[in-house]
Amino acid sequence: MAGIEPTPADHHHHGPSGTAAKLALTMLALGVVFGDIGTSPLYAIKESMSAHHGMPRDPSTVLGVLSLFFWSLTIVITTKYAWLVLQADNRGEGGIFSLLSLLPEQGKGMKSLPLPLFVMGLLGASLLYAEGVITPSLSVLSAVEGLEVISPDLTMFVIPATCVIMVALFSIQRFGTAVLGSWLGPVMLAWFTVMALLGIRGIMLEPSVLGAINPVHAIDLARHHPHECFVALGSVMLCITGGEALYADLGHFGRFPIRAAWYGLVMPSLLLNYFGQGAMYLQDMTIEQPFFRLAPSWGLIPLVIFATLATCIASQSILTGLFSLTHQAVQLGLMPRLRILQTGDHQGHIFVPLLNLVMMIVCLLLVLIFRRSMALADAYGLSVSMLMLMTTILFTVYKSRTGWGPIRCGLFLIVLGSVDLVFLGANLLKIPTGGWLTLTIAAGMLTLMWTWHRGRQVLSFRFNKQVLSFDALLNSIDAHPVPRVQGTAIFLTPSDDGVPPTLLHHLKHNKVLHQNVAIMSIRTAPVPRVPEDEQVQVTELRDGFFRVRCQHGYNQSVDVPRLTKLAAQLGLESREGSTTYYLGRTILTPRGNSELAGWQKRLFCTMSQVGANNPLHFSIPPGRMVELGIQIDL
């Protein structure tokens, strides 16, 4: 098959080209890409000014914290992500798996990478799951806590209302993003506009707050309160959480719409609001909810409702991203073949029922256990800081192989890596008070993905030991002919060569072969999408035997009947009504002598039962499929 080259994101379109299309994508990006970072003002300043950091609440502290916010957004989001990291696209796609798949040599999968880089990619994906579980709980709880500003008597309703909203949010996921439709963008446009106006209102009350743009205030804060400032950086980090979404959603929108939305609206709105909240502190150092204090008294109730809606949209965006990440992990062989449902015409509209259920349970538990957004904020940030450091390292490796010299790579790694390390160090201090939760979730996901990856390697080795060569099979059939019946049989196999055990089992038990027999192997290419004319290769052997090699991108679903039609156009004798598909149902036992640890064998066997040869994964109609059991001892 032809080689597959990455193409620039700006050449990758999901709709009509032109200015109108880019403006439409920019509007959509507001709802999908910037939901998370756009709701950070609800809790970021409040948490950074918290008394438990030990810094005095005075004007110099307020200006110092605001200066840290301004320069964090400028360096990490504006410079690193929006300007530089968006350049690293794989056929227009972004995200940790896309970045990882850019690193191997052409034609090789990312599993050929050096072990440290491969594990770093798995850990990055694991951290996204940890962040994705904590974000909905934190953001919705922060918004609903606005009830306390309206009236202290409403405090008792915060937890129940948050739980009801969370259950509703997860319940509508099965209907897909189409339920929310195209109003996500306009709602978030209104949200950013309101935030900007509220910020301007605060700044007009205390214009001196704009002096925080001067980095001297941040430097003075660090000089006079070094320990307290370092601890507070763990909370300052909250203003840039969600920044990785700029890169993760690159494939849906392209570089121009994401950059236009960030530079044109999102960043100015965030900075205005943060500075407005700082002005409220300069007016009254005792306030506890600076975001909601920006609003006039008549606007409090609408603002709480609006903030809750915005956090639901942010959570929706995160869930959609995790569904896509899970789909990629399944296609790359890093997770079992979970049940994944298509909820719309667009390839990104998918729903993973098991993941949705587990996340809903975990999010509800987090709300019930932590009960306050400030308590939950300690669990947040660590995953983001670790992920951002890994992105910096992987991006440096990528640029070192695509044109950057050692000096540019070194400068990028030293400057941006140092910033990431400082944030990571500050967040490591939060491990006893909540960061342990992030590490536990990420470690659990990393263990699952690594176990599945290693188990599949061992399984492939055991499977290949049972594979018979085609020449041996054909010679055996020549010596001992078997009856042939009308129709076509397609045997799916993970191996590119030899005869799959399913065919041998079929021959042993049924003692008959179809007139046409195709051995179909399917591999995931290290690109998001493979063009249709490169997806199938057919080799005719002899005596009605065919070898069909298929490939698809890690963002594409596997549709075996469609691949069969493509193969028929290339010479495979196959008619839809007379084709039968044979799958091997692998029955695993942990009784073998492989190098896997005992607990890994048991875990892999359990995981394999979750997605054991899910026929829905291959889109094969149940009435045209035959499963044959194969036992393998790990």
Image (cartoon, rainbow, N blue to C red):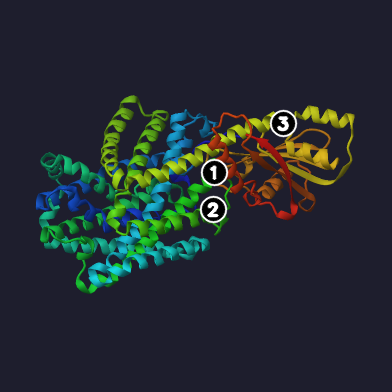
Q: In what quadrant of the picture does the C terminus appear?
A: top right
* Residue 540 badge: none
Neighbour tally class for label 1: few under 14, some 14-19, many 20 plus, Cα within 10 Å:
many
**Which image quadrant for residue 169?**
bottom left
Measured in 3D between alpha carbons, the distance from the residue under mark 1 to the one under mark 3, in whole angstroms, is: 24 Å
Q: Mark 3 belongs to which amino acid?
A: Val
Task: Pick whichever, 13 or 135, lies toward us.
Answer: 135
Specify whether 38 is left or right of 516: left
The relative height of residue 532 versus residue 594 in the rendered view (above or below) is: below
Instruction: Report whether residue 631 is seen.
Output: yes
The residue identified by callout 3 is: 467
- Residue pushed farthest bottom? 298
Specify whether 221 is left or right of 324: left
Residue at x-position 72% and y-position 31%: 467
Label 2 sits on a secondary structure element that is loop
Q: In what quadrant of the picture does the N terminus appear?
A: top right
Residue at x-position 26% and y-position 45%: 234
The picture places residue 108, in percent across and down from the top left corner, at 54, 31
The picture places residue 379, in percent across and down from the top left corner, at 33, 49
The residue identified by callout 1 is: 335
The picture places residue 292, in percent across and down from the top left corner, at 23, 65
Residue at x-position 14% and y-position 53%: 210
Mark 1 or 3, nearer chain start? 1
Mark 2 or 3, nearer chain start? 2
Instruction: Report whether residue 19 is seen.
Output: no
Mark 1 or 2, nearer chain start? 1
Neighbour tally class for label 3: few under 14, some 14-19, many 20 plus, Cα within 10 Å:
some
The picture places residue 463, in percent across and down from the top left corner, at 67, 33
Label 3 sits on a secondary structure element that is loop
Q: Mark 2 belongs to which amino acid?
A: Gln
The residue identified by callout 2 is: 347
Measured in 3D between alpha carbons, the distance from the residue under mark 2 to the one under mark 3, in whole angstroms, is: 35 Å
